[in-house]
Image (cartoon, rainbow, N blue to C red):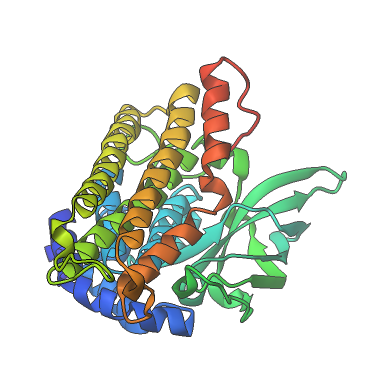
Amino acid sequence: MTTAAFDANAVVNAVQDILPKLRENGRQAEEQRWIPQENIDLLEKSGVFRIATPSRFGGLDLPVAEQTKILAEIARGCPSTGWVASVWVSSTWLATLFSDRAQEEVFADPSVRVSGGFTPTGSLTPTEGGYVLNGSWRFNTGCRGADWNIAATVLEGPDGTHTEVIAIVPMSEFTIADDWHTSSASGTGSSTSTAEDVFVPAHRVVDFGEAIWNVTPDRSNTGANGRNYGLFAFVMAETVATFLGTAQGALELFLDRIPGRAIAYTSWENQALHPLTQINVAEAANKIAAAKGLEAGWLKVLQDRADAGEQPTLEEKAAIRGQGAYAVQLAKEAVEILYRTSGASVIQRSVPLQRFFRDVEGFSLHGFLLLSTNLELHGRVLLGLDPETPLL
């Protein structure tokens, strides 16, 4: 596909064409604890890594709703590949909050892949022309195939003050540990990355608070350009897309397995004729539909605000966090229902549905996505209380 041929529909169609291969490669991803290079190559050829790159650098610069549609399609084929893609795409968007000079460096390749995370487990110390970075970051999804890495860290001022900042650094400056041994999400390769005395130029560092409010300096892509979304609301939207795609893929896998299946130790020779099967598959499908209904609401809020050059209100951000986590729960429950209605043969490694089930269970444990945490936050704001977190 040539650059001129890329648009949202073309990327969606291209991803749908490779879904069988992504699904086929799922077992290999799990066994090698990282997505196959073939998956990465197929996604790049499909234009996926251009969807969040600004148009001035040769990217598609798609609105969030079109980005999430593409990410959900990837997860239909392979949840781990979908999870990695969502991190790369959302982190690529985050790179647009850095200075113009940093963006020119990062987007020298419009198909750039950016990994990163928001836990400040490193330190920056001032030096001539910039800073020295040290630290380790666990669960660094996508680090094994990234070009750049976003490292949340603490800036130590000469007066002893500490400020949370975000640095963007070439991935080649980090070492990657072989420490990703998990029972789910195995294919994401979310290993620990470490930086030791790495020099970071000043223009590649932004204040965390300014990034949250989308007011980072020295950048031309500000204002009502339709892409300045609220940081954590945007990340929630991109992440939830992986769950919705995973649940939809699980439903498709379940329906593919049903024809001709009997129910063991009963007189039922066709599971599809059993009322419980019919009830369960309908419940799963409706949970997915309900989650997608919630998604449509927050995607509209995010786009309307970005088009107006505004940030979402506190109430809107809290609702997106609460509803996002609730949609994750609905998607997870849908997969659980389908898995438990599939019979004992579903536990075989050769049956993709069991991997969808284990991956969605693992993804849902991510601290940013926990239902209890997000409902508490949402509820506090609904009750007129302080949310007690800046991560909105």
| Closer-to-camera residue (312/186) | 186
At x 18% / y 64%, what residue is drawn?
268
Q: Is residue 220 left or right of residue 131?
A: left
Q: Please identify the residue farthest to the top as the structure is shown.
A: 384
Q: Is residue 58 visible?
A: no
Corner quadrant of residue 287: top left
Give the residue drawn at x 54%, y 45%: 370
Q: Is residue 342 above or below residue 315?
A: below
Q: Nearer the viewer, residue 281 or 156?
A: 281
Residue 292's x, y, as percent? 27, 41
The residue closer to the viewer here, 100 or 93, is: 93
Counting from the top left corner in percent of width and height, residue 92 is at 42, 57
Image point 44% across, 65% down: which residue? 358
Residue reaching furthest to the right: 159
Is 214 placed left or right of 72 in the picture?
right
Q: In screen coordinates, is 27 left or right of 382?
A: left
Q: Closest to the observer: 302 or 297?
A: 297
Quadrant containing the N terminus is bottom left
Percent of width and height locating residue 5: 12, 64
Picture quadrant where residue 352 is located? bottom left
Dividing the picture into quadrants, the one containing residue 391 is top right
